[in-house]
Image (spheres, helix red, strand yellow):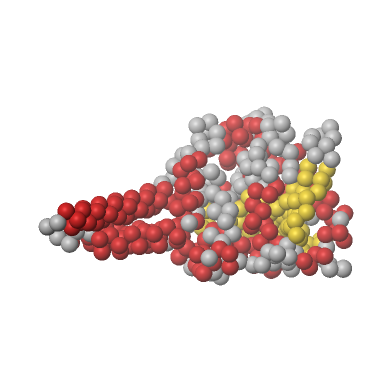
């Protein structure tokens, strides 16, 4: 045998080994992703990993499936067990990683399976304009507060009176900004809603009920400019995520001046006394400090703040229509918060709709095209449409 033939054979063997190692790495990465999706880790990294594994799982499933099938083709012919084992591992991982997309498609919200893989096939956003204004100047109460407003083209028509949404950002009450979810909010605007995203004063410098007062001012500011922004002053729905969801429900149910006809709360805490009972200084968010900074102490010393900030304690039969959405695997805000709030509203015969996403963790709607993002968008649009 010539030296050239030996060289070629050696080179081919090296590439084959490299390919097997690469495929093995993909399969191991798939196993890690599945573990992250099911492990309720108590760290920010674990939460972010779970969000990636669940909301991007359908893409990862394709990689796992391809790796398994190619492994079978490149595996050692003399060891069929190894070849078939890799193949079955890839298929099994693909099924598990694709389960969020499958479950989302079975929730009856009419999501687009095609868009899960081709995100750019969403609504046309070119006619949605974004403006930024200051709705309250800096004064002795605190810094200037801005409002980011997404408007569909219909808002510019003479005499327009569109329904509008006040979208309140999250961030643990001490962080975050109005445009954190602007991709999702902009897409909502493309369906014919004016979406206003107000800033609010943050803890620990500002405690509840300062945030409630800010949202009341933001709603009043928008109503004063109803002609400019093409909104119907009476057709307000207030929406909030996480900490913003707490503010949203507390304002919708507890502040008559806000005059919200409906409320949408995503993975939010609605009972702050209940949250305090389970808060620990060593949990993921240091929730003990978070609550004390926001409310000014514990229920024994800041009882009024805990009460007025807890929508579950403000429910009556006349409470506005409410949509609640929460991920079963949320490690930042316990899903029991939404379960208990929905139960309380039903007991009071208040109109409520609750959707629980069995695969989802916190902030599952960040990407509008993902399983959680699409389910949330479709459920919200249906809820808003029923109130028109």
Q: Residue at x 70, y 37 (%)?
A: 202
Q: Residue at x 57, y 33 (%)?
A: 288
Which quarter shows the C terminus? bottom right
Most extreme residue toward the left, as rendered? 1
Q: Residue at x 33, y 59 (%)?
A: 67
Q: Nearer the viewer, residue 178 or 312?
A: 178
Asked if one can make out residue 311 in the rendered structure from this viewpoint, the answer is no
Q: Residue at x 83, y 63 (%)?
A: 230
Question: Could you tell whether 216 is left or right of 39 in the image?
Answer: right
Q: Nearer the viewer, residue 264 or 69?
A: 69
Task: Give residue 327's position: percent from left, percent from top.
Answer: 52, 53
Question: Could you tell whether 31 is left or right of 365 in the image?
Answer: left
172 vs 365: above or below: above
Which quarter shows the N terminus? bottom left
Asked if one can make out residue 190 in the rendered structure from this viewpoint, the answer is yes
Question: Could you tell whether 199 is left or right of 110 in the image?
Answer: right
């Amino acid at each position: 045998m010539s030296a050239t033939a030996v060289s070629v054979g050696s080179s081919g063997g090296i590439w084959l080994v490299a390919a097997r190692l690469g495929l093995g790495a993909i399969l191991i990465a798939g196993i890690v992703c599945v573990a992250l999706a099911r492990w309720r880790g108590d760290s920010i990294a674990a939460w972010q990993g779970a969000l990636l594994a669940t909301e991007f799982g359908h893409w990862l499933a394709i990689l796992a499936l391809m790796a398994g099938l190619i492994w079978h083709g490149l595996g050692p012919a003399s060891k069929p067990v190894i070849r078939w084992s890799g193949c079955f591992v890839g298929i099994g991982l693909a099924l598990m990683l694709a389960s969020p997309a499958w479950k989302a498609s079975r929730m009856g919200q009419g999501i687009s399976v095609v868009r899960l893989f081709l995100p750019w096939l969403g609504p046309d956003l070119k006619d949605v304009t974004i403006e930024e204004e200051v709705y309250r100047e800096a004064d002795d109460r605190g810094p200037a507060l801005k409002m980011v407003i997404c408007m569909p083209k219909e808002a510019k028509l003479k005499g327009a009176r569109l329904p509008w949404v006040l979208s309140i950002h999250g961030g643990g009450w001490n962080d975050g900004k109005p445009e954190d979810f602007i991709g999702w909010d902009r897409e909502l605007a493309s369906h014919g809603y004016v979406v206003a995203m107000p800033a609010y004063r943050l803890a620990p410098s500002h405690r509840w009920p300062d945030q409630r007062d800010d949202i009341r001012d933001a709603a009043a500011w928008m109503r004063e400019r109803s002609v400019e922004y093409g909104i119907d002053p009476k057709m307000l729905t207030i929406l909030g995520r996480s900490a913003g969801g707490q503010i949203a429900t507390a304002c919708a149910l507890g502040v008559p001046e806000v005059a919200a006809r409906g409320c949408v709360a995503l993975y939010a805490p609605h009972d702050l006394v209940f949250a305090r009972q389970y808060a620990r200084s060593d949990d993921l968010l240091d929730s003990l400090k978070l609550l004390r900074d926001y409310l000014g102490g514990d229920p024994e010393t800041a009882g009024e703040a805990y009460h007025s900030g807890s929508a579950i304690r403000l429910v009556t039969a006349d409470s506005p229509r409410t949509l609640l959405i929460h991920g079963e695997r949320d490690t930042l805000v316990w899903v029991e918060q939404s379960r208990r709030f929905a139960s309380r509203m039903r007991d009071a015969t208040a109109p409520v709709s609750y959707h629980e996403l069995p695969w989802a963790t916190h902030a599952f709607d960040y990407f509008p095209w993902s399983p959680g993002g699409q389910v949330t968008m479709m459920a919200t649009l249906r809820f808003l449409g029923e109130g028109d």
